[in-house]
Image (cartoon, rainbow, N blue to C red):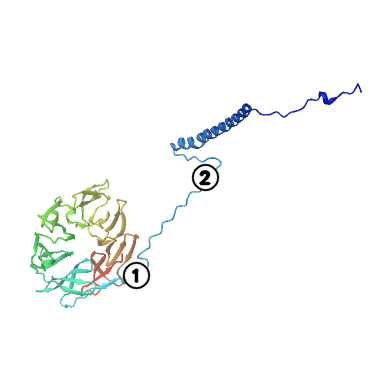
C-alpha cells in the first residue's frame, strides 16, 4: 500500500557507546585523585586530632583521651607484703639466762660487755673488809663456763672492760678515783700492757669500736675533755673540750660503726629551758654533723645508722627517754628512766627496778624481767642485754638475754 510506511527503512540502529583509551585514562585519573584526596584528608585529620592535642596538652600536664575511647581503669596499687613480726610469739621474760661462777668468794659482779658469743665482766670480793672488783672473767655463752683472766691488777678495781677480736681495754681504778686506762692485745696473752692514759680524777666509762676507744675525763678541777685513742697507733687526741662547769662534761659519749656521739650546748628557749645538740663525728673522715632535737640531751647513743636515743635529764626520777630516727620529730619512749643502753635493733632501759626493751623495727615496748624480779641494768651489746638480779639483796646474780634478730 502506498500509504504504508516502511519503518525498517528509516529506523536508526542503536549501538552501545564504546570508551576510547583517552576516556578510560580520564576516568582512572579521577578515581585516583579522589583516593589521594581522601588519604590526604585522613592523614591531616589524624595529625590534627591525634598528634597535636597530646603534644600541646602535655605541656600543661593534661592527659588527652579521644572521646570515642573510655578512660583506662587505673592499675590498682599492689599492696606491699607486710614484714613479718619476728617478735610476735616471743615471751621475753623467758629469754633470760643466768651466768654461773663456780668460785664462791665473789659476791658482786658488774660491767658486763658482750662481743659475739663471749661475755667479759668483773668479779668482786672482800679485801681487808672492803668490796673490790679484783677479777676479770670471760664467759662463753655456748659452754656456760666462766674463766678468770690472768691479768694483773695494779690498783683497787677492774672497771668498764670492753673487748673485741684484737683488744681488751679496762680502767685499772684506784679506790678514791683515778687510775690507768690499760689495753692488751689478746695475742700477747696479757703479757705486754699498753698504758693508754693516766686518769687523775674520776672513773671514766670506756667505749670501744674496732681499734678506736672513746671516753670523757675530768682533766682539771672543773674541766672535762672528750678523748679518742687509736689503739693501733696508740695516738690519743682531745676531740672536745667542754666549758668550765658545763653539764655536758658529765654526759657519756658513745661510738658505734665509726660514729662518735656526744652532747653539747645549743641554747636556751624563751621559757628558759636549756636545749642541747647531738654532735656526730665520723672518726674515719673527720666529718662533723649536729642534730638539734629541741630538748636537753644527756648520754646520747646511736645504733650506727642515723638512729639516736638520749635522756633529757641526769638520771632523775622524771627523766624521759627519747628516740629519733632520720632526723624526724623525737619520740618519747618512756618516763622515769634510770639508765639505758642501745644496740643495733633495740633500746633497753631500766624503769624503777625492771628492765624494758624498745624494739626499733616495730616500735613496741616489752618487759624482759618478771613482776617478781628486781634488777639493775648494766649493759647491752652484740644483741644481748645484761643486768644484775638483786631480788635476794644479799648477792648479785648476773643475768642476760639474747634478743632474736
Residue located at (18% from left, 72% from top): 108
Is 352 above or below relative to 289?
below
Q: Position of residue 310 (x, y in %)?
A: 25, 56
**Rendered position, 18 above or below 177:** above
Q: Nearer the viewer, residue 331 or 1?
A: 1
Query: Mark 2: which secondary structure?
Result: loop
Does residue 142 sit above or below 329 in this rendering? below
Residue 392 location in percent, x, y? 24, 75
Mark 1 burial class by Cα count in 10 Å: few <14, some 14-19, many 20+: few
Which sits earlier in the primary sequence, circle 2 or circle 1? Answer: 2
Query: What is the number of the mark on residue 71?
Result: 2
Pick the residue in front: 186 or 307.
Answer: 186
How far separated are the C-alphas under marks 2 and 1? 53 Å
* Residue at the (46%, 35%) spot, across then down: 56
- Residue 103 in percent (x, y) is at 16, 77
Mark closer to the observer (2, 1) = 2
Front residue of 26/230: it is 26
- The local secondary structure at tag 1 comes to loop
Q: Is residue 34 left or right of residue 307?
A: right
Q: Classify 381 as above or below 103.
A: above
Q: Alpha-carbon neighbours of circle 2 within 10 Å: few (<14), some, or many (≥20)?
A: few
Count all numbered tags in the image, as a single digit: 2
Along the horizontal axis of the image, is 130 left or right of 3?
left
Q: 272 or 133: which is nearer to us?
A: 133
- Can you give x and y, in whole percent of width and height, for residue 174 in the image? 9, 65
Location of mark 1 (residue):
91
Whether residue 355 appears in this view of the structure is yes
Amino acid at each position: 500500500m502506498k500509504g504504508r510506511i516502511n519503518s525498517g527503512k528509516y529506523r536508526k540502529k542503536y549501538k552501545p557507546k564504546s570508551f576510547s583509551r583517552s576516556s578510560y585514562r580520564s576516568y582512572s585519573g579521577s578515581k585516583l585523585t579522589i583516593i589521594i584526596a581522601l588519604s590526604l584528608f585522613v592523614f591531616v585529620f589524624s595529625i590534627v586530632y591525634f598528634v597535636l592535642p597530646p603534644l600541646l596538652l602535655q605541656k600543661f600536664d593534661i592527659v588527652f583521651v579521644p572521646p570515642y575511647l573510655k578512660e583506662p581503669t587505673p592499675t590498682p596499687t599492689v599492696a606491699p607484703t607486710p614484714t613479718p613480726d619476728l617478735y610476735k610469739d616471743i615471751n621475753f621474760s623467758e629469754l633470760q639466762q643466768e651466768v654461773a661462777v663456780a668460785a664462791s668468794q665473789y659476791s658482786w659482779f658488774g660491767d658486763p660487755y658482750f662481743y659475739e658469743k663471749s661475755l667479759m665482766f668483773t668479779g668482786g670480793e672482800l679485801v681487808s673488809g672492803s668490796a673490790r672488783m679484783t677479777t676479770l672473767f670471760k664467759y662463753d655463752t655456748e659452754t656456760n663456763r666462766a674463766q678468770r683472766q690472768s691479768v694483773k691488777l695494779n690498783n683497787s678495781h677492774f672497771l668498764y672492760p670492753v673487748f673485741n677480736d684484737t683488744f681488751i681495754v679496762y680502767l685499772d681504778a684506784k679506790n678514791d678515783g683515778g687510775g690507768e686506762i690499760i689495753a692488751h692485745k689478746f695475742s700477747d696473752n696479757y703479757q705486754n700492757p699498753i698504758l693508754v692514759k693516766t686518769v687523775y680524777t674520776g672513773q671514766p666509762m670506756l667505749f670501744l669500736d674496732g681499734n678506736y676507744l672513746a671516753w670523757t675525763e675530768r682533766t682539771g678541777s672543773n674541766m672535762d675533755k672528750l678523748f679518742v685513742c687509736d689503739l693501733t697507733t696508740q695516738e690519743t687526741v682531745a676531740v672536745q673540750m667542754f666549758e668550765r662547769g658545763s653539764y655536758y662534761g658529765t654526759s657519756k659519749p658513745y661510738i658505734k660503726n665509726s660514729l662518735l656521739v656526744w652532747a653539747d650546748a645549743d641554747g636556751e628557749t624563751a621559757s628558759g629551758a636549756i636545749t642541747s645538740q647531738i654532735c656526730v663525728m665520723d672518726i674515719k673522715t673527720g666529718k662533723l654533723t649536729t642534730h638539734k632535737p629541741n630538748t636537753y640531751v644527756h648520754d646520747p647513743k646511736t645504733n650506727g645508722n642515723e638512729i639516736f636515743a638520749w635522756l633529757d635529764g641526769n638520771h632523775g626520777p622524771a627523766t624521759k627517754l627519747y628516740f629519733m630516727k632520720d632526723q624526724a620529730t623525737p619520740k618519747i619512749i618512756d618516763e622515769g628512766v634510770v639508765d639505758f643502753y642501745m644496740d643495733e635493733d633495740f633500746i633497753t632501759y631500766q624503769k624503777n627496778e625492771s628492765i624494758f626493751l624498745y624494739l626499733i623495727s616495730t616500735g613496741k615496748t616489752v618487759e624482759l624481767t618478771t613482776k617478781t624480779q628486781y634488777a639493775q641494768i648494766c649493759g647491752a651489746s652484740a644483741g644481748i642485754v645484761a643486768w644484775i638480779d638483786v631480788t635476794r639483796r644479799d648477792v648479785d646474780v648476773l643475768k642476760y638475754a639474747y634478743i632474736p634478730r
